[in-house]
Amino acid sequence: MNTKALTRSEVFGQLRKELYGEEQSRHANTHIFIILGASGDLAKKKIYPNLWWLFRDGLLPANTLFVGFARSNLTMQDIRAACLPHMKESFAPLVHQVTDAESESLSAFFSKNSYLSGRYNDAGSFEQLNGHLSSLPDGTDANRLFYLALPPSVYLDVSTNIRHHCMSSRGWNRLIVEKPFGRDLKSSQELSVHLSSLFKEDQIYRIDHYLGKEMVQNLMVLRFGNRIFGPIWNRDSMACVVLTFKEPFGTQGRGGYFDDFGIIRDVMQNHLLQMLCLVAMEKPASTSPDDVRDEKVKVLKCIAPVEAPEVVLGQYVGNPDGDGDSKLGYQDDPTVPKGSCTPTFATAVLYVQNERWDGVPFILRCGKALNERKAEVRLQFTDVPGDIFDERCQRNELVVRVQPDEAIYLKMMTKRPGVFFSPEETELDLTYKSRYKNVKLPDAYERLILDVFCGNQMHFVRSDELREAWRIFTPLLNRIEREKESPIPYPYGSRGPAEADDLVKRVGFRYEGKYKWVQPHAN
Ligand code: NDP
Ligand code: BG6
């Protein structure tokens, strides 16, 4: 193993080579990154900070300029002030210390930024935007990246206006679209048809930021870079697969937006389903974006629309014994309509009907205002046939913890140490914080934005993937809206409705509640 520590510039030098290849000249062109919705929450919390980190670490092409566009009458000073608090939490492949050079670099970053206000449905505003882009050094020839950090209600206008008024005639143009991509199969198809009438598929980057997370990307390497998992990664050895997303806070005043979507559209149909695809897909012919996405689509095509008996929906209520926000239920959020039937929690069971997975339940669980923050993939193996240990063995589980505290651990039986000869549950533990002490992981958006610069669509959602994803959930979503059945209440800070545990037990997940993990590196 190479133990020599690399310097910061060596690490970034290697990364640059990996990203852009030896031949840098291709990227000598000017790039303009245009943030539409620059005054918004996503822009200030994610887009600007991530652009800054990429800029700081020298990972963007040398001549990159940034242009913000939104309705508000703002200056770059206003944007800078709004973004700065979110720029502090920094990433670097090496542990990062703020230096004088960095504060100079921050000024250099903002000197490459400009802002323009205009209206999203106004062709004239986009002509002005184009005038501004063209007036920048090399602006007419520059490659242009348009980030739609906007509510979906304006996607149609904005994409049309970009296409008709703001395209670079000599450089390439790429459009980055944020979820939600529609709210059901029909509206999503309408959006897809609209976008494909304006842009080619290889110009459209649909972001699902879970695809930018370290451990989600790791699923492919774990599966296809190891000999040991391949032969057991199927219905012969797996009892079930559980994909979990939990957040310990509620809608925090954003309930008005959330209420129109609910947890299935917000998390299950995209983040959890994408993780499912990476767990279930066959090995792609190569790591080319289309080979990978072809395999994901095949998985989705094998999944029937989710059925009501295999779904539990919940909505959080205030916890009278809790403190602060947890006293308040979903419907106490003033932006949520009274009597709302929107689920804030859902558990659903899907089946991938192909030769590898037939009969294995894929359990998708997600919710807000739960007991902890956690996203993970858990593969529970079947019992060992022909038991000789008097039923004292628990099932093996392979857990890929996406966040927080990235880890891969395999729960397994070993001989209890000492004079005993009895099985005991323990784990093989790859906790990233212990194994990769000096490595800080990048934000998901950082990787994904970089991919757009590099033209790599592997971690972006293709239109046929999207169509299949909506096909699976639309009948359920229609039924929820039609029948307006009240979701099961669960207290803020709990694990969600007990009915969800009953469902997962019924389909075959076994929870013993005996396993105790002893943190190896705790003081
Ligand atoms: P748990 O034993 O907490 O949970 C196992 C699974 O059972 C989870 O999917 C959990 O869901 C579910 N579950 C919990 N309670 C019930 C219930 N009453 N009925 C049905 N299902 C239930 O987690 P682990 O086995 O992963 O490990 C225990 C602890 O050890 C965890 O905190 C884990 O993070 C830690 N650990 C950490 C490691 C590391 O950092 N490297 C390595 C190994 C373990 P739910 O999410 O809803 O609780
Ligand atoms: C977003 C959802 O896509 O993901 C939010 O719209 C959710 O409701 C968020 O809070 C979670 O992202 P992360 O990266 O914090 O797990």
Image: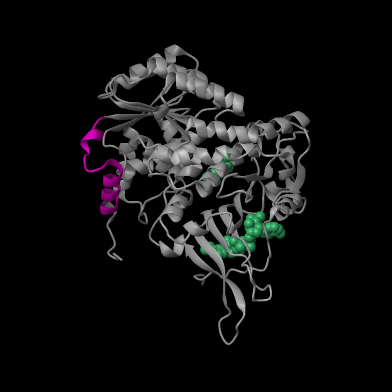
Q: Quadrant of residue 304?
A: top right
Q: Quadrant of ligand 2?
A: top right
Question: Does residue 277 appear left or right of residue 350 in this picture?
Answer: left
Q: Residue at x 56, y 85 (%)?
A: 418
Q: Quadrant of residue 455?
A: top left
Nearer to the camera, 317 or 235: 235
Position of the N terminus by quadrant: bottom left
Farthest residue, direction top: 124
Q: Residue at x 30, y 66 (%)?
A: 3
Magenta span has 150? no
Q: What range of the chain is rendered magenta?
A: 10-29
Magenta span has 28? yes
Magenta stretch: dominant secondary structure: helix
Question: Does residue 6 appear left or right of residue 345 in this picture?
Answer: left
- How far across and how far down the image is residue 298, in percent? 51, 39
- Position of 76 relative to 369 (above/below): above
- How far across and how far down the image is residue 513, in percent? 68, 65
Q: Quick check: can you spot residue 404?
A: no
Nearer to the camera, 468 or 385: 385
Q: Quick check: can you spot residue 37?
A: yes
- Position of 517 relative to 312 (above/below): below
Question: Does residue 440 appear left or right of residue 253 in this picture?
Answer: left
Question: Does residue 195 appear left or right of residue 8 in this picture?
Answer: right
Q: Quadrant of residue 81?
A: top left
- How far across and how far down the image is residue 237, in percent? 57, 59
State how the image is colored.
one colour
Q: Residue at x 68, y 44 (%)?
A: 345
Q: Residue at x 55, y 46 (%)?
A: 276
- How far across and how far down the image is residue 303, in percent? 60, 40
